[in-house]
Amino acid sequence: MNRTSIIRNLIAGAALAFGLAAHAADITGAGATFPYPIYAKWADAYKKATGVGLNYQSIGSGGGIAQIKAKTVDFGASDAPLKPEELSAAGLMQFPAIIGGITPVVNIEGVAPGQLKLTGPVLADIYLGKIKAWNDKAITDLNPGLKLPADPITVVRRSDGSGTTFNFTDYLSKVSEEWKTKVGSATAVSWPEGVGGKGNEGVAAYVQRIKGSIGYVEYAYAKKNNMAYVLVQNKDGQYPKPDMATFQAAAAYADWKNAPGFYQIITNSPGKDSWPIAATSFILMHTSQAKPENGQQVLKFFDWSFKHGDKMAEELDYVPLPDSLVALIEGAWKAQIKDGAGKAVWN
């Protein structure tokens, strides 16, 4: 599957089967749209290498959490990590799978990717509905020399339960006290205004169609669709370009070793090179596996992806996990994921 095919399928927004029909898939998963581009590449390569297929439904983090709790899939995927107490109550464990970045994207005539600059507070005010036109002084003051129209701003946001929304609103809550107080951070919030798109795919499609719009998507969606991404001021006052290097700079501040349940949020990380809306995507699995052979197949897939998928991840501007973190993850697999007799599924 080439990159053009991947993005075409992304915009279609369908549940995908990689390399084989859904009824014949050996592994089933559902959830976050944020990591979908890399899971597609990994699954295609893994099928060719091993003959084992994967059916992954790109339905949003909220749907992934619901499906794994209902035991209708072998794994769930969420960009919003579950807190240790929630994991324990549901009989789940989680581990990070990939790191990437969320970027605002706009559809403004004459504005190219990376030309528009926004601070966190200004971005929050746009989503609060306080800034309503692109030639508002708060925006033009940040962009001297950039011709901005008097067009009204159409806010585009997610309509489904979304880990991308969780990280985006977490960032806005850190940079805007008004946002934190009035809206807050969650996979689904009461938006002050805007039109809702389902999945990263839906938001990208709306922004591409609506003149004067702004939305937020995982960077791979912006890059592959040649969308006009926005430069966002980081905690150190800089405007880094969104790419693998700046996502990695933000991720360097995560303390995975001392994070119970791998609970870490990496938005608004310090560092002059850090992208301010970096995010981690997580995998959720049951600690007691009713079908241990299925659980083992899931772990084999991610073990293979961690060992062989770095280049594929980098091509899409995701950050592969460092070897030290992979070792922690596989140690957690051995300690936490068991069959009905209490025997480790991974060894």
Image (cartoon, rainbow, N blue to C red):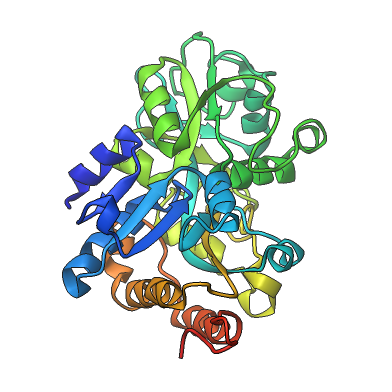
Horizontal side, residue 228 vs residue 164: left or right: left
- Vertical comparison of 44 with 124: above or below: below
Residue at the (59%, 49%) spot, across then down: 66
Report the front residue among 56 and 239: 56
Can residue 115 be seen from the camera position used here? no
Residue at the (20%, 55%) spot, across then down: 20
- Vertical comparison of 179 with 233: above or below: above
Residue at the (25%, 58%) spot, across then down: 24
Where residue 201 sits, quadrant-wise, is top left
Task: Give percent across and percent down for residue 118.
Answer: 56, 34
- Vertical comparison of 295 with 148: above or below: below
Residue at the (23%, 60%) spot, across then down: 44
Q: How many marks?
A: 0
Report the front residue among 221 and 79: 79
Task: Give percent across and percent down for residue 223.
Answer: 33, 42
Report the front residue among 259 and 177: 259
Task: Give percent across and percent down for residue 45.
Answer: 22, 65
Can residue 106 be seen from the camera position used here? yes
Report the front residue among 301 and 316: 301
Task: Give percent across and percent down for residue 81.
Answer: 63, 58
